[in-house]
Image: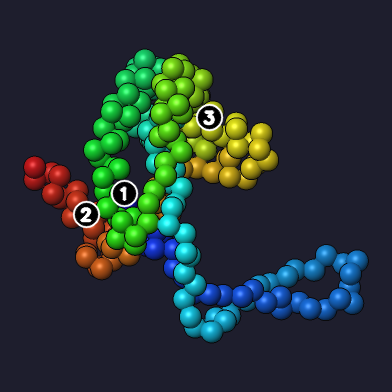
Amino acid sequence: VGTALWFASRAQDYNIILADDNDNDDNDNEATATTATCHSQDDKDAIANCRVLLLGMGADEQLGGYGRHRVAHRRGGYDAVKEELKMDRDRLWERNLGRDDRVLSDHAREARFPFLDHEVVSFLGSLPPDLICDFDLPPGQGDKRILRLIAEQMGLIHCSGLVKRAIQFGSRIAKVSDVQRYGSSRSASKRATKQQSEE
């Protein structure tokens, strides 16, 4: 997580321009496929000048976004989910935020956490878990249900139905790390399983 956040917070990428390969205007009435090709504009890095980043940390911990929340629901219903959410909220400060602050500081950036605003935390903590999430629905619908409904109302239809993907997996940094350290993701998984069985 720290490595993926470090790369994301550096806010640096190659400056690219998108060129339309299909400049033919002869067939305005026909639906034609357009392809975009990336060209490096001048091989200089594009660097964001922002000093403050908005981060979504706290959403999963408060809105039932982790697989373990679904497992807790299967195990003991919404009472078990409520306990799991409380545990996540209580340990978030020491488990994640110190790391995140140090990672962003390396790029002289500061974080703002809208989901951890005291009014948001207080409001979400006052709601029963069955208003926050609905684990009778599949992943990508029932987890963080209240947030998904708000996103839908704001017109963010596509992203409101995406299944959660942790930053280290969505960014593929976990796979790169596994390949560098162990030769492949499969070797890393076998090694982790072996270590667990030895403990």
Q: Residue at x 22, y 65 (%)?
A: 181
Mark in the foreground, 1 or 3: 1
Q: Residue at x 28, y 36 (%)?
A: 93
Q: Amino acid at mark 3?
A: Arg
8 left or right of 140?
A: left
Which residue is tagged 2?
A: 190
Q: CA distance from mark 2 to mark 1?
A: 29 Å
Residue 107 point in image, percent of width and height? 34, 62
Q: Element under label 2?
A: helix
Q: Residues within 10 Å of mark 2 (few under 14, many from 20)?
A: few
Disc 1 or 3, which lies upstream in sequence? 1
Please state the horizontal and vertical placement of residue 124, each as a whole percent of the image: 45, 24
Q: CA distance from mark 3 to mark 2?
A: 35 Å
The residue identified by callout 1 is 100
- Disc 1 to disc 3: CB gap under 8 Å: no
Q: Please tell me whether mark 2 or mark 1 is closer to you in this view.
A: 1
Q: Give, as a three-letter code, the residue at label 1.
A: Asp
Between marks 1 and 3, how big is the CA–CA gap?
26 Å
